[in-house]
Image (cartoon, rainbow, N blue to C red):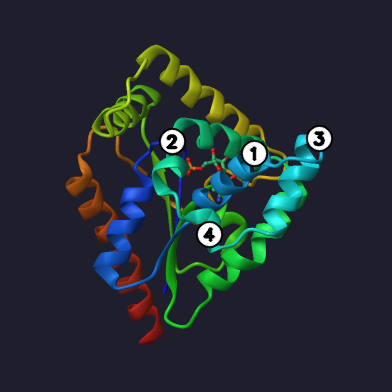
Amino acid sequence: MIIAVDGPAASGKGTLAAGLARHYGLPHLDTGLLYRAVGLAAAEAAGTPAFEPRAIAAARSLDAAHLADLPRLQGAEAGNLASKVAVIGEVRRALLAFQQDFAHQPGGAVLDGRDIGTRIAPDADVKLFIEADSKARMERRARQFEALGQAVDRYALYHQIEERDARDRANPNGAFYPAPDAHLLDTTQLDIDAALRAAVAIVDGVLAKKAKQNSF
Ligand code: C5P
């Protein structure tokens, strides 16, 4: 079974995807980490002066070592750099096969990102599109950073999130919109447990419907 989980920054999609993966015993890929790693590598690469060729080279040579420093990858700087490299078509193409192979491994997988249901795995068995209003998303992100001991300017963070969303939604290479067969889940008023229960109910509902169709 392939479960695609898409949604904007700090919507809770990563936590939900990890929870679904645990619940159904499936491997999980946070595809945002790939773009974050490429963004950091491009910012740090020496030699080529232009950002775009550095990002393309970083995407083509990405390996597990680039994904090791999780706290740095999860930081605000990496998030902003990620959304800048994510608009480059060649970067997206370089990361495509890895994500598609992960999705289509035997037994299936859970992937979260922006274009999982639309481009990486349009054939996913279940597609979720997670939403939450910008203020709630900012507050969640602020608490995550504070838990890591980082100082947070909530006003700046709110604008960063809005700016990143706008860039992601306008990304001509991105396909960031709910797939026509996606199930929308608004987590604004839900805590993690309630959101996971709602997501599991959606997945179970889809599976039950498919089982019924297959029995005819
Ligand atoms: O999900 P996360 O916030 O880690 O993603 C970081 C950035 O990477 C996003 O803002 C988006 O620009 C990009 N991204 C993408 N497609 C994905 C996953 C992430 O364009 N499948």
Q: CA distance from mark 1 to mark 2?
A: 15 Å
Residue 146 appears left or right of 213: left
Q: CA distance from mark 3 to mark 1?
A: 12 Å
Q: CA distance from mark 3 to mark 2?
A: 24 Å
**Which residue was labeled with disc 4?**
65
Give the mark toward the camera: 2 or 4.
Answer: 4
Q: CA distance from mark 3 to mark 4?
A: 24 Å
Q: Earlier in the sequence, mark 3 or mark 2?
A: 3
Q: Earlier in the sequence, mark 3 or mark 1?
A: 1
Q: Earlier in the sequence, mark 3 or mark 4?
A: 3
- Find numbered disc 3 in the image and state the secondary structure of the residue it sits on: loop
| Residue 69 image point, x, y percent | 44, 49
Tag 3–tag 2 contact (CB < 8 Å): no
Give the mark toward the camera: 3 or 1.
Answer: 1
**Which residue was labeled with disc 3?**
50
Q: Amino acid at mark 3?
A: Ala
Tag 3–tag 1 contact (CB < 8 Å): no
Q: Earlier in the sequence, mark 2 or mark 4?
A: 4
36 vs 139: above or below: below
Tag 3–tag 4 contact (CB < 8 Å): no
Q: Earlier in the sequence, mark 1 or mark 4?
A: 1
Residue at 62% across / 30% down in the picture?
A: 167
76 vs 178: above or below: above
Q: Amino acid at mark 2?
A: Gly
- Determine crowd level at label 4: few under 14, some 14-19, many 20+ residues with C-alpha closer than 10 A: few
Q: Give the number of the disc on residue 75.
A: 2
Q: Amino acid at mark 1?
A: Glu
- Find numbered disc 4 in the image and state the secondary structure of the residue it sits on: helix
**Which residue was labeled with disc 1?**
44
- Determine crowd level at label 2: few under 14, some 14-19, many 20+ residues with C-alpha closer than 10 A: some
For the view shown, which residue lies furthest in the front direction? Answer: 46
